[in-house]
Image: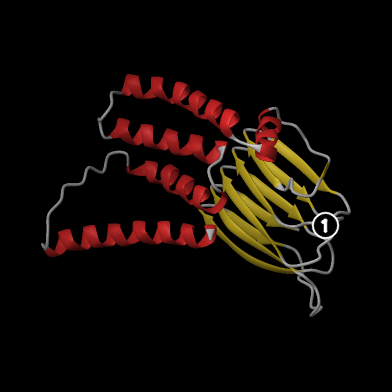
Amino acid sequence: MKRNLASIIIGVLFLVAGVAIGGNMLGFFEFSFNPAGWWTIFIIIPALYSMAQCGLNTGNGIILITGIILLLNAQEIIPVTISWQLILPVVLLFIGFQLLFSRGSGHKQQNDTASGHKHGPFKKGENNATAFFSGQDIHYGADEFTGASYSATFGGITADLSSAILTRDVEITVSVLFGGIDIILPENIKVSTQVIPILGGFECKYRSSKDPEAHTVHINGNATFGGVTII
């Protein structure tokens, strides 16, 4: 569902841009476009895509807020002095709301991430990790692995699943903004990848199993100004 939503968001953006520019060039309608701040699309669109893939988290939320404020500043909707003064308090407010209203393991995860905590073996149901201006080394024990979601923004995540047990096909969602994610997979599994690099990189070094009974790990997501490596 998240993957489909992400495709819809990106597709709609391209359709709107194509219709607007094409219609204007052919004279069907006229509109004025101020190109000031066009570079902020490389901040805003990856943040929206990350939200569609992994949901709202501290990393992509802060990137989106920063991109919008910089765009408003470039368009002279808000003065330069006010825009830069707005970024810090708005970011602090967003982090505060995230910490107060997030629930369960997600709340614990964000607190650990903010302090740069490095996790030991993960328990079942604790497979979501966010690294924001920090790094995490995650080691899964010999327990059933049911899937995960990793988000790295100006940080890095190493997820070691070499000891994890798969009893069925699972999905791993990755989202990178100016960071990196390395995933170490267990032996004798199949790998299916659909990671979209946006001015970033993706590399799968893992040799997928040819065993017809092997379970499949589906790895989906995006890497923007960063990288994802499957080992």
- Dividing the picture into quadrants, the one containing residue 72 is top left
x 41%, y 56%: residue: 9
Give the colour scheme shown: secondary structure
Eyeballing the image, is 177 above or below 133?
A: below
Q: Position of residue 118 (x, y in %)?
A: 78, 35
Is 185 on the left or on the right of 15, as rendered?
Answer: right
In this figure, what is the number of numbered marks? Answer: 1
- Residue 99: x %, y % from top left: 60, 29
Residue in the image at 78% along x and 56% along y: 145
Mark 1: few/some/many CA within 10 Å (<14, 14-19, 20+): some
- Residue 164 sits above or below residue 64 on the image: below
Residue 229 horizontal/vertical position (percent)? 69, 55
Can you identify the residue that label 1 sits on? Answer: 144
57 horizontally vs 71: left or right: right
Amino acid type at mark 1: Glu
Q: Is residue 81 above or below residue 220?
A: above
Image: 231 above or below 169: above
The C terminus lies in quadrant: bottom right
Nearest to the observer: residue 12 or residue 183: 12
Q: Is mark 1 on a helix, strand or loop?
A: loop
